[in-house]
Amino acid sequence: MQEAGSLLVKLLEKQKVDRVFCVPGESYLSVMNGLQETSIETILCKHEGAASMMAEADGKLTGRPGIAFVTRGPGATNAASGIHIAQQDSTPMILFVGQIGKEMYGRDAFQEVDYQQFYGGMAKLVIEVQQSDRLSEIFSRAYHTAMSGRPGPVIIALPENMLTEKTDKKPLEFIDQLMSAPTTKDLAQFIEEIKEAKNPIVVLGGSIWSHEAEKDLISISEMLGLTIITSHRRQSYYNNLHKNYGGDLGLGVNPKLINRINNSDYLVLLGGRLSENPSQGFTLLGIPEHNKKFIHIHPGSEEIGRIYKPHLGIVSNPIAFVNILNNALKGLNTKPNSNNELNAVKSHEEYIEWGDMRLEAPNSGVDLTSAFRTLRKHLDPNTIITNGAGNYAVWGHRLFRFTRVKTQLAPISGSMGYGLPAAIAAKLRFPDNMVIALAGDGCFQMTENEYATAVQYNAAVIVLVVDNEMYGTIRMHQHKHYKGNYKHTGLVNPNFSDLANAMGGKGYKVENTEDFYELFVEANNWANKNKLPALLHIKTGSEMVLPGKRFNSL
């Protein structure tokens, strides 16, 4: 017999969980006690929102549920930011939430929250373990739910006195992800149609992807002469330097790419949902009907036809789909359509031109365009780049080129504060990779306390804080709609380099473009030597709203 809290830790071990993120609380002391007797690494975060973001980022990188523990009431409500990211980004994740004792329910007890009501609109499943003997059953359901169909977050509430109950239940064996696959009929129709298409384009997105899947899709694109583009903040799913890569659908998109999509007669959405940002505000296609053949391949049947009526809907795991399709096309000895092949090459040339075109520089402060282009020349392909939300991120999306799968971590939900927690999770997962967190001054201050977490766990990330002394995205919208009225978006910032030093890392202030790369190298060398995080406080001035565009040009 053992406490249910100890059983839960053993259940996690059976799923090969090697790391959990948490803020401790008295509501799950039994679990914390069990974690002391295991090989699972426990990362103690400073805020529950950051803990859930780290778990979400870990889920993106592994394809298995990221795990976070938070306490009841305020701990659970703080964690909601990471749950929302996991829901919108379709990331497998499980949040274990401490709960009040079972005999306290319904009395508005200390830190009591109805988690079904609170999380019901964000999570795939919200469930509570009432009896310790049902813990294994509910745990199994949670893992299957988080990974099946469209992946997403699951919430498991753990009443404090349930966790201390004794149980003789055994931990479950490893749970594999369910893999849906296309039917023979759907695959045959898809192959016949795409071979006949005059200008086919594949939009790659979603959360289910792998190195092997990228290889299969590259092979498919070369056999068929396909143009491959990636959805918003999924740029690392396909080698950006491959001759058939045409760019990404997101914020600040290349107008020539939009034209190509408008002129395509066969548009394939692979793994993603074509939500608001990649669809340019739901304007790319008519809703629900439109004037082109639209093929939607998605692991969740509920997503097919949810917004756009497809010409062909295929319920399939995208990894399984491209593997089966690649093998089928090889068996047919397929040759590319020369016109499609030319379109793909031209599309790639337009992507390169868009990233390299001359952009207007600011009159003062660091020129992000020049700085990031210089950095791009020297980065190792395995460098992982993270960011949160803000106009600063558009520089990263447009100027960096990703050539390795899952080297970009960014929330399609547009959540501020994500960059630093995600970078910490990535560095802990891949300690030999350089990890760079991009953050605006407002974005960074959402989770800046986690810099101390990076120090505590020797996560030697490099944080680039872009300081323009304002919430730039909101200022942009103010300028568009209420020109001249900019109250409530200005920031009075700390000296971020001093803050990094005070927390035990190393900070550098960058005030000139010419100094940027030299200081970046110095920061990276220091971080690697000391196994601690470094931060560059980049002063940009406030005149540029987007790459090459000034506020006064809006």
Image (spheres, helix red, strand yellow):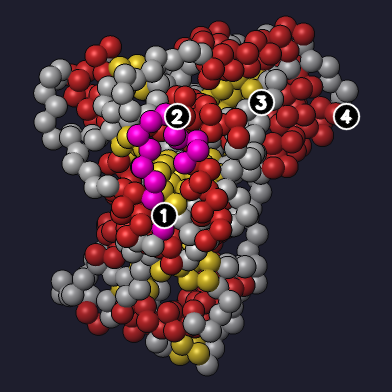
Q: Which mark is residue 331?
A: 4
Question: How far, Cα to Cα, is label 1 from label 2?
Answer: 20 Å
Q: Which residue is mark 1?
A: 506
Dot 1 alpha-carbon crowd within 10 angstroms: few under 14, some 14 to 19, many 20 or more: many
* In this view, 234 is above or below 115: above
Mark before the other along the chain sequence, 4 or 1: 4
Please name the residue shown 59% across and 43% down the image: 383
Residue 108 placement (x, y as % from top left):
15, 71
Mark before the other along the chain sequence, 1 or 2: 1
Q: Which residue is mark 2?
A: 514
Q: Is residue 500 magenta?
A: no
Dot 4 alpha-carbon crowd within 10 angstroms: few under 14, some 14 to 19, many 20 or more: few
Dot 3 alpha-carbon crowd within 10 angstroms: few under 14, some 14 to 19, many 20 or more: some
Q: Are marks 3 and 4 in contact (CB under 8 Å)?
A: no
Please name the residue shown 31% across and 79% down the image: 26
Question: How far, Cα to Cα, is label 4 from label 1?
Answer: 56 Å
Question: How far, Cα to Cα, is label 3 from label 4?
Answer: 27 Å
Closest to the observer: 363 or 265?
A: 363
Label 3 amino acid?
Leu
Please name the residue shown 85% across and 29% down the image: 330
Please name the residue shown 49% across and 30% down the image: 372
The local secondary structure at tag 2 comes to: helix
Q: Are marks 1 and 2 in contact (CB under 8 Å)?
A: no
| Residues drawn in magenta | 505-519
Q: Which residue is mark 3?
A: 241
Residue 13 placement (x, y as % from top left):
59, 73
* In this view, 240 is above or below 480: below
Q: Where, by quadrant of the figure, is residue 545 drawn?
A: top left
The local secondary structure at tag 1 comes to: strand
